Image: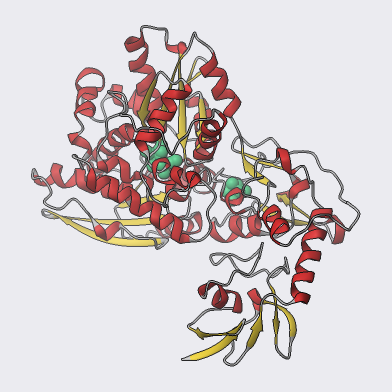
Amino acid sequence: KKYLTIDGRQIAIEGERNVLEVARKAGIEIPTFCYHSDLSVYGACRLCLVDIAGRGGVASCSTAPEPGMVVKTSTKQIRAMRKIAVELLLAAHDQSCTTCYKSTSCKLLDLANKLGVTKVRFKPGFERMPLDNSNPSLQRDNNKCILCGDCVRMCQEVQGIGVLDFAGRGSHSRVVPAFGKDLKNVECIYCGQCARICPTGAIIPKNEVSKAWELLDNPEYKTVATIAPAVRVGFGEAFGMPVGTDVTGKITAALKQLGFVAVFDTTFAADLTVVEEAEEFLRRVTAGGTLPQFTSCCPAWVKYAEQFYPELLPNLSSCRSPQAMFGAMAKEMLPKLFDVPREKVKIVSIMPCTAKKFEAQRPEFSRDGDRETEVVLTTQELIQMIKGAGIDFNAIEPEAMDLPLGFKTGAGVIFGVTGGVSEAALRYAYKKLTGKNLANVEFKEVRGDDGYRRAEITIGDNKVRVVVVHSLSNAHKICEEVKAGKADVDLIEVMACPGGCVGGAGQPVYVGMETRKQRAAGLYRVDRNMQLHSSEDNPYVKEAYQNILGTPNSHKAHELLHTHYQS
Ligand code: HC1
Ligand code: SF4
C-alpha cells in the first residue's frame, strides 16, 4: 500500500481521486462549497485549500494524492485564508440570514460560525437582483448565490438538462437560467436537485406552509393529509433520529394535532397504481400494444418526456401518479363520507418532491377550477409546521392512519425507492400470470443504487426484461436506445431524483449517497414488517374496484386514474 501523511497521520491511498477524498475517508473535515463526489471537480470556492510540503497552499479537491505527500489541513495561514474567503463571500451576499429558509442548514453560515467570523472586514458590494418566483416548484434568489456552480453541474451532469449556467464576468458573474430568462420559461422539469445541492438559500423549494394553515384555519373545510412513501423515512432526521427510521405513526399523530380531520397514505394510491399499471402492461403485451412501457409516477420524468421525447409519449403508461390518483379517489369518496360538497374537501399532500407541486397544478388534475390536490408540502415544510406549532415530535405517541385511504401494502411503500415500482409490478404480474402466491416477494434483481440497471425476470413461461434508471441523464440513455430500436426491454422505470423519491429535493438536506441508501433500507424494512406485500391484496383497493371503479382499466378507472400527456 502507498501512504501519504495528513495532519501527522499516515493514511493509505486507495484509489481516491484527490487529497480531499483521502482526508474525508480518514474523518478529517476539509470545508468546501463546490466539491461533491457525484459532480465533476470545479475547484472554484478555494475553501478546501491545504498546505502541501514543498508546494504551499493548493486546492485539495483538484490535487491528486501522491505517496509520501505531507499535508496539513489547518495551519494558521490556511485558516486565515479560509476566513478571508468566507468574508469575501459574505460581503458579496445578501446577509438577511434571520429570515432565510436555509438559516439552519446554510453551509456558508455554518462555516462562518466555525471559522469565527464575527464581522465582515470588506465593504458589502453586490448588485441587488429581483427574486425569481416564476417557477411552480422553486424560488431563486441570486443575491444569495456564491457562484459555487453546484446547481449548474447538477442540472447538466446528473440531470443532463443544462437549464442553468454562468453569465457575465468578474464582479458581474451570475448563475442564471438559459438566455437570462425566468426559471419558468426554460426547460426546467422541477426536480429541485439544484435546490437540494445549493449550499445557501439561492435556490429553494417554494414554500406553501401559509396556504396549508389557511385551509386548517377555515372551519368550513374538511382538510385531510396524505403522506408519500419516502417521507416516512426522511422525516426523523430533522429530530435527531437515525437515518431511515420509520416515523409514519408519529407523523400521523402530529398531523392530527395540527388539525387535519383525517390522515391518509399516498401509498394506498400507489397500490392502485400497481394494479392499473401492471394490467396496462399485460394488456400491451397480449394485445400487441406499444412497448416498452415506461412508468409515469414521477412528475419530473413526465415533464422531461413531454419536453424532450414527445415521440415516446405513447410508451408512457397512461396511469396518473399515486398523488394524482389519490386526489381523484379522495374527491370521489370523501364528500360522501364527510357529507359535504366536493369543493369543501381539501387535500394536502406531503411529498419528498418539489415537482409534485407542479404536478398538482396541472389543469388536468382540477375540476371546474377546484384542484384535486389543493396544496403540496415537502417533507421539510411539514417539519417546519410541526416545529412552528410547538409539537414535541420526539415525545409524540404514534397513531394509526384513517381508513379506507390509509391502508396499504408493502408494495406501495417501496415506490419511494428506485426499483420499487418495478418490483411492485412484478409481484402483481407473478400472481396474475401464474395464479400462485410468491414464496419470496423480494425481487432483489431490480434493487440497488446504480443509475442504470437491467434485469430479466422469469415468471412462469414468460420473461420480463426490465430497465430501472434514476437521474435523467440515465433516462436520456435509455430513451435514445428505445428510439433507435436497440433497447431490448419490456418495462422501464424512471425516477428523476438520484436514488428515487428517498433522494427527493423536499427531504431534509443531505449530501452523499449513504443517506439515501439508508432511507431506502428503511423503506425495505417497512415492507418486510407489513402483513401484505402485494397491491392486489389490499382489501380497500378491492373495495374501491367493487364500489367505484369496476375492473382495472375500466372506463371509470380511466376517468379517475389515468391521464393524457401534452407534447
Ligand atoms: Fe414518490 Fe410516488 S413514490 S413519486 O417517489 O409514485 O414524490 O415517496 O409519493 O405520487 O406513492 C414522490 C415518494 C410518491 C407518487 C407514490
Ligand atoms: Fe435543472 Fe432540476 Fe433545477 Fe430545473 S429543478 S434547474 S431541471 S436541476
Tell me residue 418's x, y (percent). Answer: 38, 52
The mark tally for this picture is: 0
- Outermost residue toward the right? 123
Residue 29 appears in which quarter of the rendering? bottom right
Q: Is residue 567 visible?
A: no
State how the image is colored.
secondary structure
Tell me residue 93's x, y (percent). Answer: 80, 50
Q: Does 85 sit above or below residue 367?
A: below
Residue at image coords 42%, 36%: 395
Q: Quadrant of ligand 1?
A: top left
- Which of 463/202 is in front? 202
- Which of 386/369 is in front? 386
Tell me residue 314's x, y (percent). Answer: 39, 42
Residue at image coords 44%, 24%: 257
Q: Is residue 511 visible?
A: yes
Tell me residue 123's x, y (percent). Answer: 91, 54
**Is residue 145 rendered to the left or right of residue 373?**
right
Residue at image coords 37%, 59%: 485
Residue at image coords 21%, 58%: 457
**Is residue 148 rendered to the left or right of residue 549?**
right
